[in-house]
Amino acid sequence: MAYKREDGRKNTELRPMSAQVGVIPNADGSARFQIGHTIAIAAVYGPRELHPQFLQDPMKGVLRCNYNMMAFSGSGDRVRPGPSRRSKEISLIMEKSLLPVLDLSKYAGSVVDVFVELLQTDAGTRCAAITAASMALADAGIPMKDLVTAVACGRVEDQLIVDVDYLEDSHEGGVDLPMAMSMNSDEITLLQMDGVLDSKSLKKLLEMGKEACLTIKKVQLDALKKKYGTGVVEV
Amino acid sequence: MSGLLVEDRNIVFPGDIVAQGMDYLPSGDIVRIGDSLISTKIGLISLNNRIVKLIPLTGPYLPKRHDTVIGCVVSIGMSGWRLDIRWPFEANLGLAEGSSEFIQRNSDLSRYYGVGDYVRVEITNVASSRIIDLSAKGPGLGKLGSGRVFFVKATRVPRIIGKQGSMVGLIKEHTGCRISVGQNGVVWLSGEDPVKEELAVRAIRMIEREGHISGLTDRVQEFLKKETKI
């Protein structure tokens, strides 16, 4: 019998999403993004002077991301606070996936800090973090040629699925494929994979991921429109 | 599909395609990628013939020559002052540009501007992100006395000032406060009555919040009238 998703979703169906921009008034830009039970809050500060000085780039600004799961965010043991191998890796891939759309050339020598806290996790945290960070960067007014949208696709048994949750992620022999995209240029800015997948399935998953990213981008834009308004403004 | 895809004064978001083809020219925060003109910030479209410009609704302050800003003195050196102008790097206010009067070398510079003082200055040169020169010589420039200082989004400063100072003039008229707004988003105000000062702050915050919604002048006027009656 073919695998059926625990929560009854179709293979191409995303979990319920919600997003809000400007959730942290003290920050220069901020956003909250929720997909299923995964909740990410991103705050952007800067551009500001970068210390230590040897990290500065004299030609352009530097993006510095910090990903952190809160101690109570998981459903099992308490998450040990502070940086870990995993959080450092995700912070790095966040930078790599956001940088292709950012233009920091006007902020030479400075840093734009992005802090992402995961309040609650149910897989797909790096994707939720990137999606929230992208909205927060737009809210902060950092020049960017597109929003970055991310989703985790995967395979459980013989089924290709989008927006993997924790149960599916931890399924034995499964595949997890987080990806981030800039939809305007069709550019994939993040692609990681756990497990083994044939090329035909990979292509199919990328197509499914792209469709899902389109839906997520609509949620991102709706959140920005809610804060900034829409249509023609008479000034 | 070619030509303009948005109207004048439309709100656009990063990645929105504003125009297709070569008929329109990008300006400001609009960039050309291939055949498309793309918005890089959240803002309002401003059309001037074939030039498509973006008036950003949010974003950090970017220093430009001839901008009048309010800076805070952070250190005093041998040859001038270093000011924080809400930019990642400090700007330089040289001895010769510090005041209209002649300042003797080796004199005590804190007599003119001490650390923590707010000074209204003009940006005279932006050589790079780190090298920004200022001048406090000119009408309306110089040290700001006692008063309260707060920060607003630099992108909302033109709305706070209004056409030829109309909006800030309206607040001054209703509250009796002296108000100085720097293009870097630093606002200094001073009044006789703390209640009126607070009212001026609230009015400015209201403009900052609702600056992109139509009928702002009427709303601010109504707000000030209502509050000053009580």
Image (tube, coloured by chain):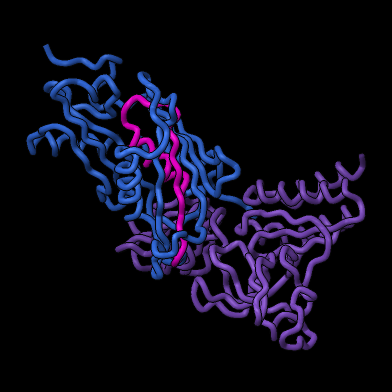
Q: Residue at x 13, y 24 (%)?
A: A173
Q: Looking at this view, name the residue that lies furthest to the top.
A: A1
Q: Nearer the viewer, residue A39 or B44?
A: A39
Asked if residue A156 lies left or right of residue A94, the reply is: left
Q: Is residue B61 above or below residue A138?
A: below
Q: Residue at x 30, y 35 (%)?
A: A151
The percent coordinates of residue B182 (x first, y second) are: 69, 65
Q: Quadrant of the N terminus of chain A?
A: top left
Q: Quadrant of the C terminus of chain A?
A: bottom right
Q: Residue at x 77, y 50 (%)?
A: B201
The percent coordinates of residue A109 (x first, y second) are: 45, 66
Asked if residue A50 lies left or right of residue A36, the reply is: right
Q: Is residue A34 above or below residue A54?
A: above
Q: Nearer the viewer, residue B221 or A81?
A: A81
Asked if residue B176 lies left or right of residue B56, the reply is: right
Asked if residue A204 lies left or right of residue B35, the reply is: left
Q: Residue at x 66, y 69 (%)?
A: B75
- Which span is picked out in magenta? A108-137
The stretch drawn in magenta includes residue A110: yes
The percent coordinates of residue B223 (x first, y second) are: 81, 44
The chain painted blue is A
Q: Nearer the viewer, residue B225 or A179?
A: A179
Q: Is residue B3 visible?
A: no
Q: Is residue B193 visible?
A: yes
The chain painted purple is B
The stretch drawn in magenta includes residue A96: no
Q: Nearer the viewer, residue A56 or B12?
A: A56
Q: Is residue A32 above or below residue B97?
A: above
The percent coordinates of residue A215 (x first, y second) are: 34, 35
- Residue A100 falls in which quadrant of the image? bottom left
